[in-house]
Amino acid sequence: MEFDSNKIDELVARADEIFESPEVEQMLSEFYALKAKMEEAEKLIKEKIMEDGIKSFDGPNVKISSQYYGAKYKVDESCIATIPKSLYKTKYLPDTRAIDAFVKDHHDLPQGVTPTIRKKNIRIALKKS
């Protein structure tokens, strides 16, 4: 897979010519078309890797790791009186560690605390050579 990184360097050097040069405008147009294609390809690559169930990979050139993001639990405000104060940090912000410990001890979530559906993110990074 090859592309001419010198053209990107040239575009960066000549970017201030955008208003006078149709050539620079064309280069910028090609750059953003390539960027959009690369971003879409990255999204599809990540989806394919996640479909295969890979959680992490540490190869000689690439490192892949995945993690969930967003709140793990949410507090049902109508049940706030029944939820132990030790299980949330502020009135409606669940304390994930405390709730995980509660679940470990009681094998169930307390009334008024429900799990959320969290999105999983995958990160792909080049290793420094």
Image (cartoon, rainbow, N blue to C red):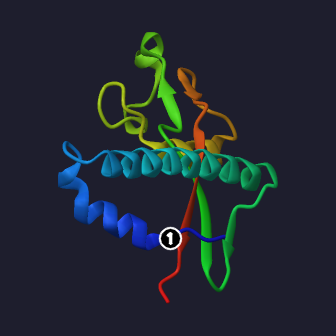
The x, y position of residue 81, in whole percent, is 41, 16
Please indicate, yes or no, whether residue 14 appears anywhere in the rendered image. yes
Q: Residue at x 31, y 45 (%)?
A: 22
Q: Nearer the viewer, residue 54 or 35?
A: 35
In the rendered image, which quarter is residue 60 located in?
bottom right
Label 1 SS:
loop
The x, y position of residue 50, in whole percent, is 73, 51
In the image, residue 52 sits, relative to residue 9, either above or below, namely: above
In the image, residue 116 sits, relative to residue 80, either above or below, namely: below
Name which residue type carries label 1: Asp
Estimate how packed mark 1 is, as few (under 14), some (14 to 19) or many (20 or more) residues with alpha carbons within 10 Å: few
Q: Residue at x 32, y 37 (%)?
A: 89
Please indicate, yes or no, whether residue 97 appears anywhere in the rendered image. no
In the rendered image, which quarter is residue 53 located in?
bottom right
Q: Which residue is mark 1?
A: 4
- Can you name the residue that lies furthest to the bottom here? 129
Q: Nearer the viewer, residue 40 or 27?
A: 27
